[in-house]
Amino acid sequence: MKKEFASRVSLTSKSGLNAIYPSQDPEMISFTGGFPDATLFPSKELADSFQIAISNQHSPLQYQVGEESIDLREKIASLLNNDGTVTNPELIMMTQGAQQGLDLVAKLVINKGDGLVVEGPTYIGALAAFDAYEPNYYSVSMENDGMNLTELKRILIEKSVKLIYTIPDFQNPTGVVMSLEKRKQLIALANRYDVLILEDAPYRWLRYEGKSLPTLKSLDTQDRVIQLGSFSKILAPALRLGWLTASGEIFSRLKELKAGADLETSNLMIQTVNAYLSKYSLESHLTKLQKSYRIKKNAMMTAMRNYMPENISYTDPKGGFFTWITAPQNYDLDNMQIMSFKPAFHVMVIPSTNLFPDKAHKNGARVSFSSVSLSQIDSGIKRLGNCLSDSYQK
Ligand code: PMP
């Protein structure tokens, strides 16, 4: 058989997405995965909701041909409206996680060589999804209040850009929240240079401190923001249930692409989550998650203060799953092979190399606190601190 793969294959295989899965080594403390804490899954409630769904007289096991999810879409629309994002069930599409939304939006607009702006660093899985469409990436550096808009503006002036991908709330991997001022300026720039924005918001409702800022979608007056949401972090990733909201032709074309990709999202899962939201309170579940993750986040900050060498800085996220460490320029965290692990230290993080499209940034790393225990946070960050000082004494 002639094995001649499409050019996109060689790009996607470089994404490093496998790096986020936990190690099998029992000694290892892994801060790599953006996994929710499994002890917080509402398993009993979901089992009950599944029973309700599968007993539904309108066969939940059949293809639904488009109309399957109206009850759930109504509930999502009201969750979004309560959050300040005006939408309606007709403009919400269920997806297989937010990940499918990333793929569909890139499929919608990106031809080979088209300009695509991403935050630097960005979500590793977004690069994996986008790579397949062979974009020309422009990476804009992250600051403490979101992407650097001076850099963005320069890119928009000099290059032709079709899409800006951003995670404004508790960004993966830095944990940063985009300020309100930057949100407004970003919308203004997108209007001025006629670019679409993809707002990816899976962590938005996992805020542990402070008040929410308006979504980009809520500030959009020209229908140029496509927003993604997901039940993965707030209920369970195995549901593979997310949603997308957009308007006009963007929305109708995305629906066509979705049909071509997988016909429809699992109706059984849609009905299960619909039953869950009818019978149980998502709000109290979120409160429980926030309380638990807040404790972990605080433990992570304490461990960072206690064990990180002085020349390593780290973000203090107000929500989400991640903190980001930055070492001096001459550090090469990839070369230290923390990710593919240094046996003596038994600790794993995701080095920055994989989180920039050009793979050229080596002195940062994502450290996730969501799925590790409090004692693992303490001992793992101690190991990481030792590993960093050991590798770069001098
Ligand atoms: N976007 C971001 C920023 C993420 O962190 C993730 C999961 N790690 C996803 C999208 C995909 O999530 P899912 O498909 O499970 O909804």
Image (cartoon, rainbow, N blue to C red):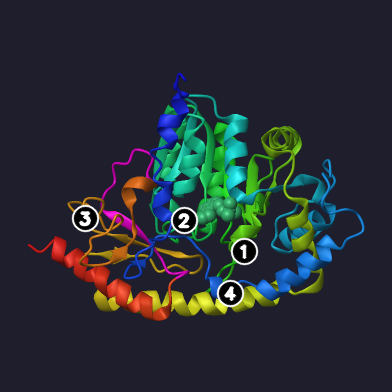
Q: Secondary structure at mark 1?
A: loop
Ranked by sequence position, the earlier of labels 4 and 1 is: 4
- Is ligand 1 closer than 8 angstroms to the Cβ of mark 2? yes
Residue behind mark 4: 40
x and y, in percent, of residue 335 in the image:
21, 50
- Specify the segment rendered in magenta: 356-371
Cα distance in 3D space between marks 2 and 4: 21 Å
- Is ligand 1 closer than 8 angstroms to the Cβ of mark 4? no
x and y, in percent, of residue 273 in the image:
74, 62
Amino acid identity at mark 2: Asn
x and y, in percent, of residue 323 in the image:
40, 64
Picture quarter with the C terminus: bottom left
Question: Is there a contact, CB below 8 Å, between mark 2 and mark 1?
Answer: no
Identify the disc placed on residue 236: 1
Residue behind mark 2: 172
Q: What predominant SS class does the magenta segment belong to?
A: loop
Q: Secondary structure at mark 3?
A: loop
The residue closer to the viewer here, 84 or 239, is 239
Ranked by sequence position, the earlier of labels 3 and 1 is: 1
Amino acid identity at mark 4: Leu
